[in-house]
Image: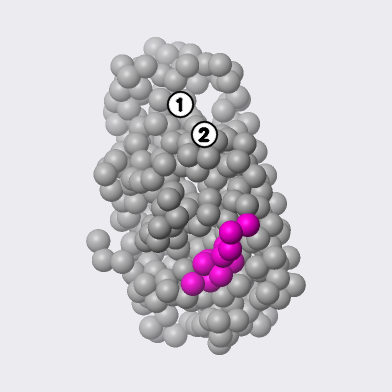
Amino acid sequence: MRIPRILEAYRESIEAGLARALEGDAPLRPTLRYHVGLENEHGAAAQATGKLLRPSLVLFAAEQLGGRPEAALPGAVGLELIHSFSLIHDDIQDRDRVRRGRPAVWTIWGVEQAINAGDLMHTLAVSTAFDASPAAAACLVRATQAMIEGQCLDLEYEHRDVTAEDYLTMIDRKTGALFRCAFELGGIAAGVDDRALALLKKLGQALGRAFQIQDDVLGIWGDDDLLGKATGSDIRRRKKTLPVVLLLERAEGDDAAALATFYRRREPSMADLSGSDAAWVAERLNALGVKAACETMVRQHLAEAGDRLRGLPFSDDARASMDELIGFLARRNQ
């Protein structure tokens, strides 16, 4: 699949900004450079920084709204560092051993130092964003607070009944906060008015919903080789991602009873589902049309993003680039 222009245009400057923010030999700096994909575990240069979607959106929005990408760069780098900090801690909480096809930080340096690395990444993110402006740093802090609240809800949902509406509210925080922040940071750098900022945040929220739902789909039906991580692990770990939430709402009779047993209040000591039980859950997901329902929701939120886009003063070229990105997100497999 062709990489969208937005994700190619700013990669070099973002990677250079990350290298500056994480340079030096102070404690944990090599760990942080490894996590963002600038180095391997031995300190050699690497090219594993991922899509860099969120910071690319910051720079794109700033440029298209009349700002200078270089002025927005510290905010963009700060946003990517916040995203990276959250992934270090998420991998610990979810016991994920692989991140972007490489060992997760905690599997190399241990849980304790991984927690320290995430905490340091957080502080470096905010200090970097201050180099853009106090308003950019404040935007990033608000988004980080919402993201952490969303992660808290995500973990809480493992222990109680959850509706699809509950789940969407959670991802508006956990995932949507940083997407909203990306467009808001671009708008702040460009000096747009409050109306434009509100539209930018709505665009980010719609993209965030689509992105997370697609992520949930890929976590069950994706390709391990393409994703760089094991698919199906969410089922085995009994995680209530959107497909499972919809399955619990749709199941009836014996299926509902069995699923209630699998997804009852989860204690930390509970074992993962067996291979045969996980396969049965996967079969039920397919039989009850859950994948199609999730894909429909992705398309709906991407269409909403397109509607928000048309209300912004972007050039025809910029709209075409965003349409290309929206199509990429709808079809992405990693």
Is residue 22 a member of the stretch shown in magenta? yes
Residue 61 or residue 124, whichever sits in front: 124
How many other residues sit within 10 Å of disc 2, few (<14), some (14-19) or many (≥20)? Answer: few
The CA distance from mark 2 to mark 1 is 9 Å
Say which amino acid is labelled 2. Asp
The vertical placement of 210 against 196, above or below, is above
Specify which label sits upstream in the sequence, 2 or 1.
2
User: Do callouts 2 and 1 mark residues in contact (Cβ within 8 Å)?
Assistant: yes
Above-or-below relation of 217 to 199: above
Q: Is residue 286 left or right of residue 38?
A: left
Residue 132 horizontal side relative to residue 283, left or right: right
Query: Residue at 58% across / 20% down in the picture?
Result: 268
The total of numbered circles placed on residues is 2
Across and down, in percent, residue 22 comes to 57, 62
Residue drawn at the location 61% of the way across and 70% of the way down: 75
Amino acid type, residue under disc 1 in the picture: Arg
The image position of residue 295, as x and y in percent, is 36, 47
| Horizontal and vertical percent position of residue 118 | 61, 48
Q: Compared to 326, does 301 lie above or below?
A: above
Q: Is residue 213 magenta?
A: no
Q: Residue at x 47, y 16 (%)?
A: 271
| Circle 1: element type | loop
Q: Position of residue 36 (x, y in %)?
A: 48, 56
- Residue under label 1: 237
At a point 50% along the width and 63% down the height, the residue shown is 54
Is residue 58 visible in the rendered structure shown here? Answer: no
Answer yes or no: is residue 10 visible.
yes
Report the span colored magenta: 16-26
As drawn, the label of residue 13 is: none
Residue 293 occupies quadrant: top left
Q: Nearer the viewer, residue 298 or 18?
A: 18
Q: Which mark is residue 94?
A: 2
